[in-house]
Image (cartoon, rainbow, N blue to C red):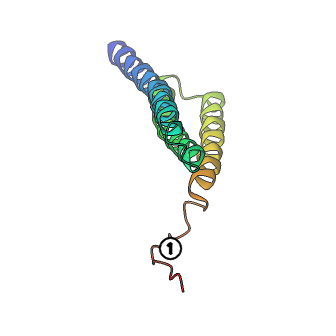
Amino acid sequence: MDNIKIYIDYVARIIEVIGVLTIFVGAVIALVKYGLSLQGIDSRSYKILKQELGKAILLGLEILVAGDIIATMVTEPTIDRLLALGLIVLIRTFLSISIQVEVEGQFPWQKKDDTPKSTE
């Protein structure tokens, strides 16, 4: 049983590294795209940079939460550890919602308005 806990702990750490790498690689790609778009002097390039950075951070945070949940389940399930996990998930959820509002301009539970707007 101890061997299984060790392997699951390794899996949790690998997932956390993947989450950090996701944020890092997403930020690098967004910055490279931003740098290349500046050559065309596109006025929307900053907005696109902000959206792509936000998406990379959102995805990375989701992966990090998964790693934290797995890591907590492997350790001794004490009240302190569960409260710490709850606090981490709460903080990351708040960050995810605020980043999504910043990127998309609306809350995740709001329905998107996909109807084309007339220009009359």
**Is residue 21 depicted above or below 55 in this figure?**
above
State which quadrant residue 85 falls in: top right
Question: Residue drawn 51% across and 28% down?
Answer: 72
- Residue 98: tell me if it is visible: yes
Between 114 and 15, which is closer to the camera in this rendering? 114
Q: Quadrant of the N terminus?
A: top left
The amino acid beneath tag 1 is: Asp
- Residue 73: tell me if it is visible: no
Between 109 and 6, which is closer to the camera in this rendering? 109
Between 4 and 109, which is closer to the camera in this rendering? 109
Q: How crowded is mark 1: few (under 14 residues within 10 Å), some or many (20 or more)?
A: few
Numbered label tally: 1
* Residue found at the far bottom of this picture: 120
* Residue found at the far front of this picture: 40
State which quadrant residue 101 falls in: bottom right
Q: Quadrant of the C terminus?
A: bottom right
**Is residue 5 depicted above or below 101 in this figure?**
above
Between 3 and 25, which is closer to the camera in this rendering? 25
Which percent across, then down, holds residue 47? 58, 48
- Left or right of 2 on screen, residue 37: right
**Is residue 77 depicted above or below 13 in this figure?**
below
Which percent across, then down, holds residue 45? 55, 45
Question: Residue drawn 40% across and 20% down?
Answer: 14
Which percent across, then down, holds residue 92? 61, 40
Q: SS at mark 1?
A: loop
Which residue is label 1 attached to? 113
Question: Residue drawn 45% across and 27% down?
Answer: 25
Question: Residue drawn 33% across and 18% down?
Answer: 4
Which percent across, then down, holds residue 65? 51, 36
